[in-house]
Amino acid sequence: DIVMTQSPDSLAVSLGERATINCKSSQSVLDNSNDKNYLGWYQQKPGQPPKLLISWASTRESGVPDRFSGSGSGTDFTLTISSLQAEDVAVYYCQQYYGAPFTFGPGTRVAIK
Amino acid sequence: QVQLQESGPGLVKPSETLSLTCAVSRSSISSDYYWAWIRQPPGKGLEWIGSVYHSGTTYYNPSLKSRVTISIDTSKNHFSLKVTSVTTADTAVYYCASHRLLYMSFDSWGQGMVVTVSS
């Protein structure tokens, strides 16, 4: 299985400041045949299901604010919230879909400082 | 966008079978999508249980494969999950979800169904 790790476990950021979450996979999730990274990012607010924010490591889903961005390749990835808003308080998960079983990171909790 | 809604018993006794159904709306379950079950134990992270294609082809997480069956009913536009011989470790919120390709992110999710395993 591909093991996903995230850092930090939690972070507190002031409103309007940048939040950065890291995700690492135990093996590369880059398919060299199509140059795609099989990595997604999800946001989960309390009592709600996860919501897909970013696919293919950096492609924002329709309707997702452009303050959310994804980057990275191979085994190391980053989700950045450029200017934290109150409604961004949530747990964020990365997930690989390069190989089954599809696996998620343990999550990073984002709070307001 | 696809809408998904889980249903089933919220309480299951140890050693019995957990059965859930996911109703699909705003899309035909026979469309070119994969349909998945994912669970989240209380206070913990997400675990993919398995996925099914409209042809009935299934893909399971090896960690659960011996106890899990996912099936699809095109006439009712829903798909189902069965987990046999449950223990308290199977207590979780169970989500159904969809993905356009097998190797693709989960783009739509149901609201989730809390299932507690307890005598």
Image (cartoon, coloured by chain):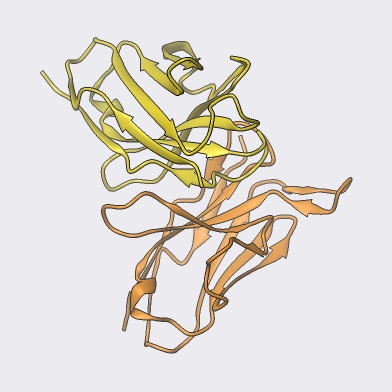
Chain colours: A orange, B yellow
Q: Position of residue A15 (x, y in %)?
A: 37, 87
Q: Which quarter of the figure has residue A23? A: bottom right
Left or right for A28, reference B3: right
Q: Which quarter of the figure has residue A112? A: bottom left
Q: Residue furthest left?
A: B119
Q: Is residue B78 above or below residue A112?
A: above
Specify the quadrant that holds the N terminus of chain A.
Answer: top right
Specify the quadrant that holds the C terminus of chain A.
Answer: bottom left
Q: Is residue B63 above or below residue A71?
A: above
Left or right for A99, reference B74: right
Residue at image location 54% in from the left, 44% down from the top: B106
Nearest the viewer among A17 and A88 is A88
Q: Is residue B3 above or below residue A35?
A: above
Nearest the viewer among B76 and A87 is B76
Q: Number of numbered discs present?
A: 0
Q: Position of residue B6 (x, y in %)?
A: 33, 32
Left or right for B33, reference A108: right
Q: Which quarter of the figure has residue B113? A: top left
Nearest the viewer among B61 and B55 is B55
Q: Position of residue B40 (x, y in %)?
A: 35, 40
Residue at image location 25% in from the left, 23% down from the top: B8
Q: Is residue A100 above or below residue A84?
A: above
Q: Position of residue A42 (x, y in %)?
A: 49, 56
Residue at image location 43% in from the left, 56% down from the top: A107
Residue at image location 59% in from the left, 30% down from the top: B34
